[in-house]
Amino acid sequence: MQRTDNSTSVPTLPTPKPAGTPGYFYNGNKDVGELGTIVSDDFLNMVQEELINATTLMGLTADKTKFGQVAQSISRAAGANFTYVTASQTLTPDHVGIVIVDSTNGPINLVLPLVAAFGGKSARLFIARTDATANTVTLTRQGTNQIDFQNTKNVPSGFRIQLFSEPGGNWIQFRDVQEVLDRTAADNGLQTNINTANDVRYQEDVKLSNRIITEVNDRATQCNNLFNDYTAKFANKVDKESGFSQLGNNALQPGGSGYMKLPNNWIIQWGLQTTDATGAVNFTFPVTFAQYCAVLQVNESAADGWGISNPPSPTIFGVATRAQGGAVVKCVSINPDGSRMWKAAQFSYVAIGF
């Protein structure tokens, strides 16, 4: 796909003429002296620019020798590609979509595409591992891109991982907690008398819950450090838009929620919410982000209720969706015997965006 390039074309787009009445093409009728529809430069330029914009949407460069670039760009944007992987390889922008990984024949290393290759648009990778072997499957970054704040990411046996590219140049993962939520919905109540020492699924859930706890704690530390850094920089400064007159370490007002607008248009928001009996809540932020919610961290407000059993009995929270004005958060409780249930529970959150 490329713009017209013959000797009669012009280097800049002509200003379109005033819009007329929309209609349809007509061949005309010479028998009665009716002329056919004139194909104008306005119409041809309109069609050409629509196709060029579709071609370059996801980072492609228009190429006169290629005739499938519009479809290629749409496949990237929609995540419509399907790839079956049995050996290590570097994924390209044309692999975005579903990637099925089978490491039966040995360990696999998948190098993710550069985020910059998508032209500032968000791309989606849904990676599903189908084998049950002990072989490792590792996702590796390119360049300075990170995979959910890491250089590499392990894909355990039987796991599915969703990754989205973001304009900052990184891959963001939808949390592994969704695996627990999916299993809970599918089970619709587990058996109550299980042999926890030999039940493979129980052992997998214990490993999963412990890994989620570790990742949630790590993310909480990162968000808390970021919040404290901003608080220290702007302490005792007046921010009339933020709902309080003085910013300090104890400025979580009013009502345990609030927000802080920074000079660079970033906003930090926080608050308390409670899921209902189905383990879900759809809530709004104190203020709406103008463009994008970059980070949303949720933590249980009463983690002392987990107990001291081995394994622990955590209540796990996960972000189902997030938008400029709010988010949907879900939670599930994992009992010591391996059973799970939806739960009404209170959590605190910190949202960062611009």
Image (cartoon, grey):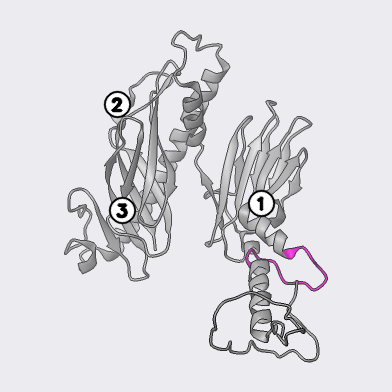
Residue at (56, 58) in percent of width and height? 122
Mark toward the viewer: 1 or 2: 1
Q: Which residue is mark 2?
A: 305
Q: Earlier in the sequence, mark 2 or mark 3?
A: 3
Q: Which residue is mark 1?
A: 96
Asked whether the residues under the numbered discs 2 and 3 touch, taking CB atoms below 8 Å apart as contact, a structural biologist would say: no
Residues rendered magenta in the picture = 57-69
Q: Mark 3 to mark 1: distance in Å?
A: 31 Å
Q: Mark 1 to mark 2: distance in Å?
A: 41 Å
Give the residue type at disc 3. Phe
Q: What element does badge 3 sit on?
A: loop
Asked whether the residues under the numbered discs 1 and 2 touch, taking CB atoms below 8 Å apart as contact, a structural biologist would say: no
Q: Earlier in the sequence, mark 3 or mark 1?
A: 1
Magenta: main secondary structure: loop
Q: Which residue is mark 3?
A: 285
Give the residue type at disc 1. Val
Quadrant for the C terminus in the image: bottom left
Furthest-front residue in this view: 32
Give the residue type at disc 2. Gly
Residue 295 in the image: above or below residue 184:
below
Name the one closer to the observer, 183 or 64.
Answer: 64
